[in-house]
Amino acid sequence: MKFKFASCLILCLILAFTLTVSLEVFGADDAHGGEDAHHGHGVDGAKLPIWSIIPFVGILLSIAIFPLVLDSHFLVHHGGKMSLAWALIFAVPYLIAFQGEAFYDILHIYLLDYIPFIILLWGLFTVAGGILVRGTLRGTPILNTFLLLIGTVIASWVGTTGASMLLIRPLIRANAYRKNKVHLIVFFIFLVSNIGGSLTPIGDPPLFLGFLRGVPFFWTTAALFPHMLFISVILIVLFFVIDTLMFKREGGIVPDDGTNEPVRVEGLFNLVFLFGIIAAVLMSGTFKWGEVNILGVHVYWQNIVRELMIVAMGLLSLKYTPFSGELRQSNEFSWEPIEEVAKVFAGIFMTIIPALAILKAGENGALAGLIGAMQQPPHYFWITGILSSFLDNAPTYLTFFNTALGKLHLTEAVVPEILSVPYNQLTDPAHQEFVRLLTAISVGAVFMGANTYIGNAPNFMVKAIAEQSGIRMPSFFGYMLWSVAILFPLFVVVTLVFLR
């Protein structure tokens, strides 16, 4: 294994040198970053060649392949080092070629995207880990379906991360005696960690970004409910059928361990802290308290207060349900899943910079053909969705949100006005088309986050918790076989029924 790891490291160093020379040549004529950094301008995506996303592709392939060829626990033991290596392979050449503009891009994505992203995940993970479902839960098809249904219903109101952390451990404990468990986790990721978060800005990060840019809070509830209900009902019925077949194949008998403890929930006072996190998110989208300039990056004060409130809620939860306390120990709570997510996504957010910049450049960038092909809602649904499966779905949503506005010659200022009027009362064709495009973008970003482990952060956390509990989860591509086989046919139906 050491030889393989060393070989990979040498190849990465060679790639870093090649990328440095190439980007230096490519950016030589335009490297005025030192002059522009204080104005808050990043690198123009039109300057970036398509091969600048090689480190991003590299980190994705590392996540997919290294656990297969090196060690099944590679990401647990070496995920941080792998993430750092790919981040440096991108960042060093990028800084050399574009200097201050590159520094702005890196600082911007960490201050405005990664840090808020990981703080919110940490807060929800910490608080939810202090709520314990006790009692005798028997992992029958009816109970499992009920747990998935509950998770799908609450995900839009406590966030996909909150719902996932509340229910994944009870689901695993209830099915400890089962031989076949992978389908339980896969459908949990589909429904609770992704599709269930479709109805409010709290449910999923892309919708929260829309809320910050003028999309009314309950617009997604009305606009996305038919799509969410349709696909959720089909998935829940399909899950019940599959789980019933699996259960019968294993004998169809629940072993009696002699216990019959009533089901109860402990640590419910943590719901106060959970609602505190939700209030912090709503506050940051409601109030405007000005901004502070941090080395050229403009950070809103309400967002800083939001992060502080979330951290405070997490610390209060730890105070009243200590990490070493009986409740968290019974919940098998540990920091390992959130640490793994934080380390791996730190590299993903770094290497994703050129991909997002190229998309933002639109028809002036290296993906001009892709952007130019986007005309109708189905195009926006599939392109936003597929990119959201591999890129961070929040900035991908925002990119195509702005693309739709630009295509229709609209500004962000008119978004609240357009979306506050029922669709059948809109008279301007451009306004009607924007509603159709935004619906497709929203559904694509949220639904297709379920396509891969990295499509949405809770996916990765649920996988880590399942593996920590001894469940052998599919590889990166193995999981995609499930998502392609089950979800893609449903996405085709959603396209034909709702997005034509």
Image (cartoon, rainbow, N blue to C red):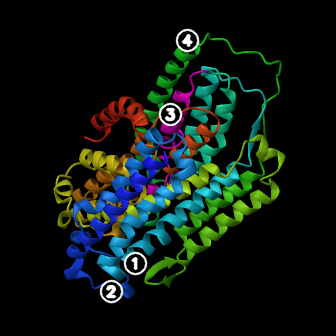
Residue stretch in magenta: 179-208
Quote the CA–CA distance across marks 4 and 1: 57 Å
Which dot marks residue 480?
Answer: none
> Mark 4 and 1 residues: CB-CB less than 8 Å, in contact?
no
> Mark 2 and 1 residues: CB-CB less than 8 Å, in contact?
yes
Q: Which residue is mark 3?
A: 186
Which of pointers 4 and 3 lies earlier in the amino acid sequence? 3
Quote the CA–CA distance across marks 2 and 4: 65 Å
Q: Amino acid at mark 4?
A: Arg
Which of pointers 2 and 3 lies earlier in the amino acid sequence? 2
68 above or below 389? above
Q: Position of residue 136 (x, y in %)?
A: 77, 26
Q: Which residue is mark 1?
A: 104
Q: Which residue is mark 4?
A: 249
Few, some or many residues within 10 Å of mark 2 (<14, 14–19, 20+): some
SS for dot 2: helix
- Residue at image location 49% in from the left, 52% down from the top: 204
Q: Amino acid at mark 3?
A: Val
Q: Quadrant of residue 6?
A: bottom left
Q: Position of residue 277 (x, y in %)?
A: 64, 60
Q: Position of residue 92 (x, y in %)?
A: 38, 72
> Mark 2 and 4 residues: CB-CB less than 8 Å, in contact?
no
Q: Amino acid at mark 2?
A: Asp
Quote the CA–CA distance across marks 2 and 1: 9 Å
Which of pointers 2 and 1 lies earlier in the amino acid sequence? 2
Few, some or many residues within 10 Å of mark 1 (<14, 14–19, 20+): many
Which of pointers 4 and 1 lies earlier in the amino acid sequence? 1
SS for dot 3: helix
6 above or below 473? below
